[in-house]
Image (spheres, grey):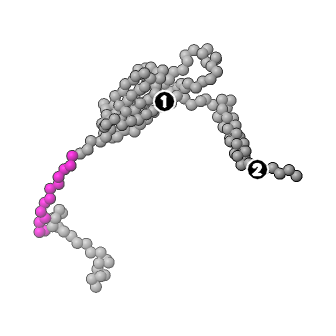
Amino acid sequence: MAINRWDPFTVLARLDTDFDELVRRTWGPQSGRTTAGYVPAVEVAKDGGDVVITLELPGIDVERDVDIEVASGRLTISGQRMGPERQGENQGVLVRELRYGSFRREFALPEHVAAEDVDAAYDRGMLFVRVRNVSKPVEAPRKVSIRAASSQGAMSGEQRTEVTASDESREE
């Protein structure tokens, strides 16, 4: 009888290979599903009281294919990255890592920010959207005056004392 030593790493490697094969069969190119559409990368940075949202949009005609809207407390940047126009260009493709299609990115805005507070600029494939005055304006401290209480009572005109059932039982 031969003695076989059990190696847990061999079992884990086989499990990893089986899982990869399952994923490939389920979501691989032969499954008939399409790959994810174009989703531009985003960077959000604070610049003083403003917020600057930067999107990677290379190869996009931003004047024609990108919309920026402010409505209901949301900033929405949507558009489309067009793929090859002619059908013949797709037939010779061996590897496709470029993504095409529609995209939509949404960002919540503070209540006091309006559409007039949003500016956009495009330079070398990068869309810069500046949202001004995102930080809520700080109200200046206000001094509250103190009135002298009259003999009849303060604030409401009379001072009232409430007696609860537990207080009545203590008095007896």
Tag 2 residue: 6
Task: State which tag comes first along the sequence, 1 or 2.
Answer: 2
Residue 144 is one of the magenta-drawn residues? yes
- SS assignment for the magenta stretch, majority: loop
Picture coordinates of residue 13 (x, y %)? 70, 42
Image-based side of 33 in relation to 40, left or right: right
Q: Magenta span covers which residues? A: 140-152
SS at circle 2: loop
SS of the residue under disc 1 = loop
19 sits to left or right of 65:
right
Q: In the figure, 23 relative to 91: above or below?
A: below
Residue 153, image quadrant: bottom left
For the question of whether residue 114 can be seen, the reply is no
Residue on which the image places disc 1: 40
At x 31%, y 77%, the residue is: 165
Amino acid on which disc 2 is placed: Trp
Query: Is residue 87 a member of the stretch shown in magenta?
Result: no
Tell me what residue is drawn at x 29 percent, y 78 percent.
167
Which residue appears at 68% of the width and 29% of the height? 30
In what quadrant of the picture does the C terminus appear?
Answer: bottom left
Q: Do labels 1 and 2 touch, CB within 8 Å? A: no
Position of residue 9 relative to residue 72, above or below, is below
In the rendered view, would you say 58 is above or below 155?
above
Q: Amino acid at mark 1?
A: Pro
Q: Residue at x 31, y 37 (%)?
A: 48
